[in-house]
Image (cartoon, rainbow, N blue to C red):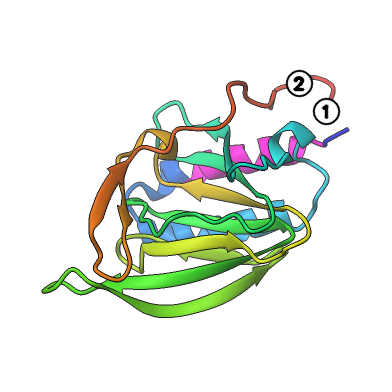
């Protein structure tokens, strides 16, 4: 049985952090990275329903959304070979790998031509944390780095990410599309269960 108390504790700590930090993104990312690191360091809390891969596409499961939509917590589940389009977030975000590994390709948009330029690529292993935001770099493509099993990462965003209008980018020209991702799940985990 999943120890959902770990997720409940994380949500409580993030709520305190966003209340105290307000619009101080640097503080939120610095302290939030430590909190997310503690959460993904132990893999015994995510209910299996929110870690199941879909053979057709990656899954984005809402685990929690702050009532004022100041932050949301999401599990991303990648089947072998699955990846996102090149996209942005428009808000701060943190990504922590819980299971498996992910590859992140980063891009920068040329202000004069709109074309995308690759700025780097890195592999994230279990327990590692990545940060994104419009101020530090916000355009990337993420994929499962493993070809034989799913990978799972926990994402925390500075808003209700499933309701935010964001952008996709075509390579290499940088043509922009808009999208609202929504969520794959229709039920949320019970953070407040008396059993844990």
**Residue found at x 31% / y 59%:** 169
Q: Is residue 133 left or right of residue 153?
A: left
Residue plotted at (33% across, 67% down): 171
Compared with 86, 115 (above or below) is below
Label 1, label 2: how far apart the Cα atoms are: 6 Å
Q: Is 123 one of the magenta-colored residues?
A: no
Mark 2 falls on what kind of element?
Answer: loop
Q: Which image quadrant for residue 179?
A: top left
- In the image, 94 versus 38, the foreground residue is 94
**Residue named by callout 1:** 196
Q: Quadrant of the N terminus?
A: top right
Residue 163: x %, y % from top left: 37, 33
Q: Residue at x 26, y 49 (%)?
A: 177
Between residue 146 and residue 28, name the one nearer to us: 146
Q: Position of residue 35 (x, y in %)?
A: 62, 54
Q: Main secondary structure of the magenta part?
A: helix
Q: Is residue 15 above or below residue 123?
A: above
Determine contact: label 1, label 2, CB under 8 Å.
Answer: yes
In the image, residue 96 sits, relative to residue 181, either above or below, namely below
Residue 193, labelled with which disc? Answer: 2
What are the residue bounds of the magenta stretch? 3-17
Dividing the picture into quadrants, the one containing residue 187 is top right
Foreground of the two, 49 or 155: 49
**Residue 119, relative to residue 34: is it above or below?**
below
Q: Can you tell which quarter of the image residue 126 is in? A: bottom right
Badge 1 element: loop
- Indicate left or right for 26 with 131 as reference: left
Q: Position of residue 182 (x, y in %)?
A: 44, 33
Residue reaching furthest to the right = 1
Q: From the viewer's perspective, tell me whether residue 6 is left or right of residue 2.
A: left
């Amino acid at each position: 049985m999943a120890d959902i108390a770990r997720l409940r504790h994380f949500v409580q700590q993030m709520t305190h952090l966003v209340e105290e930090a307000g619009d101080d993104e640097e503080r939120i990312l610095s302290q939030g990275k430590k909190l997310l690191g503690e959460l993904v360091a132990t893999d015994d809390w995510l209910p299996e329903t929110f870690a199941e891969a879909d053979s057709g596409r990656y899954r984005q499961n809402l685990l929690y959304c702050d009532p004022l939509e100041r932050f949301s917590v999401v599990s991303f589940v990648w089947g072998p070979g699955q990846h996102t389009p090149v996209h942005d977030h428009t808000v701060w975000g943190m990504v922590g790998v819980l299971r498996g590994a992910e590859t992140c390709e980063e891009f920068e948009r040329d202000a004069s031509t709109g074309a995308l330029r690759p700025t780097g690529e890195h592999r994230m292993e279990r327990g590692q944390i990545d940060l994104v935001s419009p101020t530090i770099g916000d355009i990337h493509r993420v994929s499962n780095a493993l070809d034989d099993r799913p990978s799972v990462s926990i994402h925390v965003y500075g808003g209700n990410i499933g309701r935010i209008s964001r952008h996709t980018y075509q390579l290499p020209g940088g043509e922009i599309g808009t999208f609202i991702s929504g969520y794959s799940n229709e039920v949320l985990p019970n953070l407040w269960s008396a059993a844990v």
